[in-house]
Amino acid sequence: MAGFAPMAEMPAESAANANPATVRRSFAFGENWNSFLAELDDSRIAEAEKSLQWLVGRERFEGMSFIDIGSGSGLSSLAARRLGAHVFSFDDDPRSVECAATLRDRFFPEDPDWSVERGSILDRVYLSNLDRFDIVYSWGVLHHTGAMHEAIANASRLVAPGGIYVIALYRKTRLCWLWGLEKRWYYRASPRAQSVVRGLYRGLMRVAFAVSGRNFNDYASNYRGNRGMDLAHDVHDWLGGYPYESIGPADVAKELTQLGFEHVRSKVRYSLGLFGSGCDEYVYRRVGS
């Protein structure tokens, strides 16, 4: 399958329903993911499937329910559906909702086993109307809500007994305060200023790779192996992802143990170099009911 064009401009109805306060105070994640859809092809989808298979610990998801909290581009939801899960996707960004709906309508038209909605992980009323799921998945989302610890707890309540909780969260380091300032500036900056900063950031990446004896061009060309994502869109997301919080593995373990979970597996970034913070991946299982 070749890549396909991103969606048209957001319909007036969706634009009218957007929360002005949220739009003003946070990065436009949905616009970034809308652009990413033009890069989507079979190899990226396959990489997204591999990532999910490792995290969940299963080759196929038939008979399992999967909720994608902060579904973004919709790629993870698509991968889960292709692996056989019953999928529920939601996001607070209307453009992200449209991205997931676009993928559903393209690959699984009129599918009763993939639902896409707009909703917030911080909205207790909305969450109270949702079922519990075998797989609760939220990759790189909860630390952008402005209330990360509340979001972690809220998402955990959606995990069915014996179900698994899959989350990726920014690793807490000494430079997180600096990244917080940078992100707050970046998402408000002009497109031209953002472009300059992205160029500087990629330049720093090249220097860091050269110092460590690695080939940056090889890394960039093979980047789709990172959950099927695209380096350019991930850099934009990383530099502009605000609100922004971070947390260390020990604190994740403490919080989830108190919430009634046991550790299954994790992928923790111990060497973060110049860039200060990246996402650690965690898989926990609910113990009891």
Image (tube, helix red, strand yellow):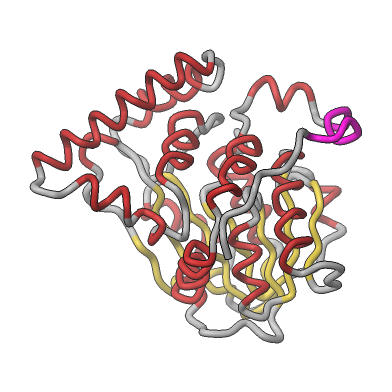
**In this rendering, is residue 232 above or below 111?**
above
**In this rendering, is residue 169 above or below 177?**
below
At horizontal 46% and vertical 20% (from top left) the residue drawn is 194
Residue 129 in which image quadrant: bottom right
Q: Which residues are magenta?
A: 10-17
Q: Quadrant of the C terminus?
A: bottom right
Position in image of residue 70 (x %, y %): 65, 49
Q: How many marks?
A: 0
At horizontal 54% and vertical 74% (from top left) the residue drawn is 285
Q: Is 165 part of what is drawn in magenta?
A: no
**In this rendering, is residue 3 above or below 35?**
below
At horizontal 68% and vertical 20% (from top left) the residue drawn is 24
Position in image of residue 119 (x %, y %): 79, 46
Prevailing secondary structure class for the magenta stretch in the rendered image: helix
Residue 17 in which image quadrant: top right
Position in image of residue 102 (x %, y %): 74, 54
Residue 258 in which image quadrant: bottom right
Q: Residue furthest right?
A: 13
Return the residue nearer the eye: 97 or 191. Answer: 191
**In this rendering, is residue 198 above or below 216?**
above
Q: Quadrant of the N terminus?
A: bottom right
Q: Is 12 part of what is drawn in magenta?
A: yes
Q: Residue furthest front?
A: 2
Position in image of residue 137 (x %, y %): 60, 62
Q: Is residue 190 left or right of residue 5?
A: left
At horizontal 83% and vertical 71% (from top left) the residue drawn is 111
